[in-house]
Amino acid sequence: MTALHGLARNPALPADLPARLAAIPELGPVLSRRNDPPPQPHEPVVHDGFMRLVCEEEVIHPDVFVAQSPRTSPVALFRLTTHAESSVRLALASRRDLPAKAYERLVRDPDPEVAAASNPSLPVHVMEELLRTTT
């Protein structure tokens, strides 16, 4: 059971919240035991093409969406390679369209999960440089 399950069972739940909780499929059985009228699923809130995501255990850093967007400029992608949040750098490391200089930075990332050495789009000269500097 999660905190959201407890919230769904809460008798003091404001009238608008059961509808928002109904958008989470796993809460359906809990909500069905309430005496409220059946909730209608809440539509996600969309701002500028990005969905505001809130999840129980992790809040996704907004720059992850920037790192994943095909509309992000190469200059911005390069700048994100030094982002303080490893989740942003990890999102970059899986891309196949980064500038070569961005891959060069990511292969040297201190977080081994982020290091882009396994990315099939890693330029050959970056692979060779990595091999030269680590052997």
Image (cartoon, rainbow, N blue to C red):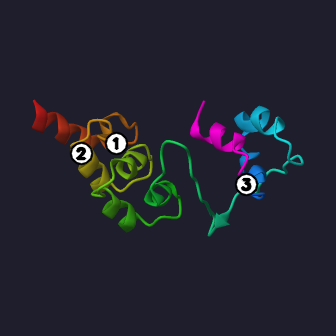
Label 3 secondary element: helix
Front in this rendered view, residue 26 or 38: 38
Three-letter code, disc 1:
Leu
On screen, residue 44 versus residue 83, left or right, reads right
| Residue density around tag 3, few if under 14, some if 14–19, many if 20 or more, within 10 Å | few
Tell me the CA gap for discs 2 and 3: 42 Å
Front in this rendered view, residue 86 or 134: 86
Tell us which disc is closer to us: 2 or 1.
2
Q: Which quarter of the figure has residue 44?
A: bottom right
Label 1 secondary element: loop
Would you say residue 10 sits in the magenta stretch? Answer: yes
Find residue 106 and report its horizontal and vertical position in percent: 28, 47
Taking the view exactly as shown, the residue that stands out farthest to the front is 12
Front in this rendered view, residue 130 or 35: 35
The residue shown at (33%, 53%) is 85
- Using the image, tell me which numbered label, if any, was put on residue 17: 3
Above/below status of 29 relative to 52: above
The residue shown at (39%, 54%) is 98
Quarter placement of the N terminus: top right
User: Label 2, on which residue?
Assistant: 109
Magenta stretch in the rendered image: 1-12
User: Label 1, on which residue?
Assistant: 122
